[in-house]
Image: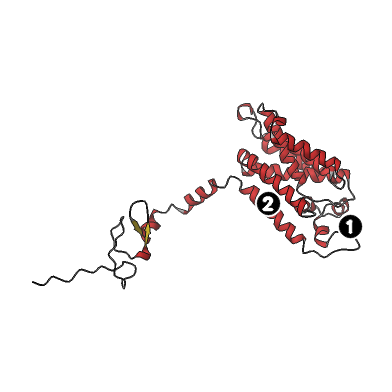
Amino acid sequence: MSLPPPLLEYCTRHPQIVTGRHCTRCDRPACNDCLTPVDIGSHCTECVRRARPATSERIRFWNAAQPVLVTRLIIAINVIAYAWVLTGTQLSSIAGSINSNELDMGLSQVFIDNGEWYRIISSGFLHFGLIHVGMNMLLLWQLGQLLEPALGRARFTLLYFTAMVGGATGALLMNPNGLTGGASGAVFGLMAAAAVGFQQRGVNPMRTGIGATLMLNLLITFAIPGISIGGHLGGALIGGAIGYAMLEPQWQRDAPWIAWVAPAICIASSLLFISTF
């Protein structure tokens, strides 16, 4: 007696391919290329797609896995700006080694008097040398990991740029005719804010790495010539003030809106002060 020929099954998505495998979820025949291994068995392409979370949910998951997104973005902008600065044309007529891009981004009172207010921000992304940008970005990375998750992205961004404006104000006050730049003012603001935050929570900042780092950098500021003393002090003063408003423990906070109003007041006051120079 002859046996009936075996029943051949073909892949649902590739009808020309014979297969003996099935999706363990929908039981449809599928070839090896159409099956994805899972914890138990394998799923076909359609079942994998149906089991995938919605786009909004995937965005939410991705967002939750990025606790220092703003810090990363600021560092990336600084690195890109530094690379762009290196493409500038050397200006031999300007005292010192400086190029056209540095001149276009740098901060000086003469440019502010000319209405170039954008330099208050652009100068915060200008660095004079690899060590300059490297040290600032290292500190920014360390401080961002501490402060951004605690403050949230919006308040951390506000703290950073308010301290940057404070640093620019201090730089113009103490050296209006110089050409200054760097993220140091903003970074000093983050350091001061972190120190204030520890103090508000009953932790002596000098017993932490933050206090020692702040003191060491202040010592370097005064000990090494060519560093913007006004920029560092201005950023630290503004950052400490904003940190006091933002990092106050929740159980002591009577007016949470101060965390948003204080930066606006500091920025407006700084700009008004600069305009009166």
Image coordinates for residue 127, horizontal then vertical, percent: 78, 53
Residue at left 79%, top 55%? 129
Pointers 1 and 2 in contact (C-beta within 8 Å) = no
Task: Tell me if residue 258 comes above or below residue 182 in the rendering.
Answer: above
Image coordinates for residue 116, horizontal then vertical, percent: 82, 55
Image coordinates for residue 34, horizontal then vertical, percent: 37, 64
Element assignment for label 1: loop
Element assignment for label 2: helix
User: In the depicted view, which residue is nearer to us: 144 or 33?
Assistant: 33
Image coordinates for residue 157, horizontal then vertical, percent: 67, 45
Residue that numbered label 1 is attached to:
96
Q: Would you call the spot at circle 2 few (<14 residues within 10 Å), some (14-19), or many (20 or more)?
A: many
What mark, if any, has residue 75 been given in the picture? 2
Task: Tell me if residue 181 comes above or below residue 146 in the rendering.
Answer: below
Describe residue 152's horizontal placement relative to residue 276 as left or right.
left
Q: Visible in this render: residue 261?
A: yes
The C terminus - image quarter: top right
Describe residue 48's horizontal placement relative to residue 124 as left or right.
left
Based on the displayed image, in which of its 4 quarters is residue 87 positioned?
Answer: bottom right
User: Three-letter amino acid code at disc 1?
Assistant: Gly
Based on the displayed image, in which of its 4 quarters is residue 217 positioned?
Answer: top right
Q: Visible in this render: residue 237?
A: no
Residue at left 71%, top 34%? 195
Residue at left 64%, top 50%? 72
